[in-house]
């Protein structure tokens, strides 16, 4: 069994949910489906493996280079590397 990624909710109000995600080496989120559109702001560089319904994908995070995804994304996110990966996720209600 893989270690779990560590979420820390920083803001949860009527407009947004802001969560810091920390992925120690080998950590995963577990399968989940996003209920909101969201923005990811990487705090570190790193690669994450995404297990999706369409197969395995790799996401290369670059510190400070944000990206967005739409509601309904379903995946398991895994840190396959030797270093911790950190990002902030902003979900838009």
Image: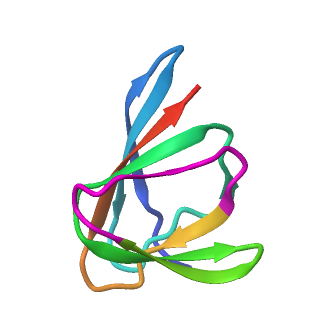
Please state the horizontal and vertical placement of residue 35, each as a whole percent of the image: 68, 39
Please state the horizontal and vertical placement of residue 47, each as a whole percent of the image: 37, 78
For the point 27% across and 67% down, the residue is: 62
70 w.r.t. 62: above or below: above
SS majority, magenta? loop
**Direction from residue 76 to residue 54 in the image, left or right:** right
Please state the horizontal and vertical placement of residue 24, each as a whole percent of the image: 32, 70
**Direction from residue 39 to residue 63 in the image, left or right:** left
73 w.r.t. 79: above or below: above
- Please tell me in which quadrant of the rendered image residue 6 appears: bottom left
35 w.r.t. 69: above or below: above
Q: Nearer the viewer, residue 67 or 73?
A: 67
> Does the segment drawn in magenta span residue 72?
yes
Which region is colored magenta?
61-74
**Direction from residue 10 to residue 63 in the image, left or right:** left
Tell how many labels: 0
Please state the horizontal and vertical placement of residue 22, each as a whole percent of the image: 33, 58
- Asked if one can make out residue 91 in the rendered structure from this viewpoint, the answer is yes
For the point 53% across and 30% down, the residue is: 92
């Amino acid at each position: 069994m893989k270690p779990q990624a560590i979420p820390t909710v920083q803001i949860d109000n009527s407009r947004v949910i802001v969560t810091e995600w920390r992925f120690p080496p080998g950590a995963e989120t577990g399968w989940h489906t996003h209920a909101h559109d969201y923005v990811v702001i990487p705090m570190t560089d790193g690669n994450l493996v995404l297990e999706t319904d369409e197969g395995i994908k790799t996401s290369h995070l670059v510190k400070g280079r944000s990206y967005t995804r739409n509601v309904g994304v379903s995946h398991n996110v895994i840190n396959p590397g030797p270093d911790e990966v950190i990002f902030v996720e902003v979900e838009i209600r």
